Image (cartoon, helix red, strand yellow):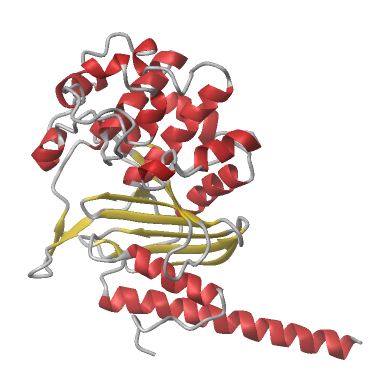
Amino acid sequence: MNKILFSLFIVLSSLAYGQTNKYDEVLNYYNAKKNFNGVALVATNGKIDYLRAIGISNRQTGTNFTINAKFKIASITKAFTAVLIVQLYQEGKIDLKAPFGIYYPNYKGEAKTTVTIENLLTYSSGIPNDAESLEMKSYQLPLKIDDYIDTYCSGNLVDTPGTKSNYSNTEYIILTKIIEIVTNKPFGTVLKEKILQPLKMENSGMLFSKDIVAGLSNAYTIDDSSQTITNDAPYFIENFYGAGSMYSTIEDLLKFDEGIFNNRLLNKSNTALLLAPNKNLNDVAFGVWYASGYGTFSKPFIYRTGGILGACSNWIHTIDDKKSIIVFNNTNGTNLYEMSEQLYLVNQGKAPDAIMPQ
């Protein structure tokens, strides 16, 4: 009997080792050929199957990445903002179908009487993103949230609310302000009290340009034509507010993933509400997207990307088999969705496909 158990242990250990080697092949390839420098994680139902850091975190000092590195997670922040809004709905403090002006009466644009909270969550408000044409210029001076909204998020409607989903930061910056008004607390405090502390996400928070955050990775921009790597241009990340100002570690983000999908942040029905795809708006959900199956991910999955200049991230959660694939990168030169597909193939016991040489 002992011999049988020992033999089984050897077989299982060999399989796990072989799978780890395949994961490593993916990371090594993307580091050597696709400018990936960062951390990758694969988990099943919240339990880590693979976790590895590779590449350079700080090119000035030559410091390599560790698995505990903190990253600017950019628009993944929107998923946190969406959860906070649905929590307030669950508590009876807001109505998702109500015009947002009920909660934000000092908003100066015409949208406050016709655009609902749900429209804001699904990028279907019709409010123009007046910062978009300026690219990063709207982040060159620190602005209080009221000033930012008055300047960049208060234009006349360009679409009928609820008819088109046009992705932008506008809606989620307005949602940030609504959270502050309804709770009478700063957004960062609400985030900490309602998500970060309950989930013990001790290495996550809001970023401010003046702060020194120990372990925060630098970010670098790669020029497509010359492949030259440069420091990200300076900007005030706080101007992204609840649309993109957070930092986190990859294991902390897994805690957030587990908190959502195991109903630790919302009850079951409101978790379903958060993640439900709007079929009339390209399957957008609240703060994330829902896909019924695409390419390598042949069954339904939720995904969320983030990117500000060189700080790039990708988060995927498959619904049926409860796989989480999270990838953080400190350059803009890698297709993280493609890389996530390769990691998923390995997790399914398959060889990485033709994108990678065998």
Most extreme residue toward the right is 1
- Please state the horizontal and vertical placement of residue 29, each as a whole percent of the image: 34, 79
Q: How many marks?
A: 0
- Residue 154 as seen in the image, left or right of residue 314: left
Asked if residue 289 lies left or right of residue 232, the reply is right
Up/down of 318 relative to 132, above or below: below
At 38% from the left and 11% from the top, the residue drawn is 102
Which one is nearer the viewer's eye here, 294 or 152?
294
**Quarter of the rendering containing residue 47:** bottom right
Q: Position of residue 38 (x, y in %)?
A: 36, 63
Question: At which x and y percent is residue 18?
Answer: 56, 84
Q: In this picture, is 345 found above or below 309?
A: below
The vertical placement of 267 against 62, above or below, is: above
Q: Is residue 204 above or below residue 331?
A: above
Screen quadrant of the C terminus: bottom left
Question: In front here: 276 or 241?
Answer: 276
Question: Residue 98 placed where, x, y %?
Answer: 42, 17
Q: Is residue 189 visible?
A: yes
Q: Quadrant of residue 287?
A: top left
Residue 49 lies left or right of residue 286; in this view the side is: right
Q: Is residue 64 visible?
A: no
Residue at 21% across / 16% down in the picture?
Answer: 109
Give the residue drawn at x 59%, y 46%.
Answer: 261
Q: Residue furthest top?
A: 105
Instruction: Answer left or right for 257 relative to 264.
Output: left
The N terminus: image quadrant: bottom right
Residue in front for this viewpoint, 55 or 28 = 28
Q: Which residue sits at x=50%, y=56%?
A: 301
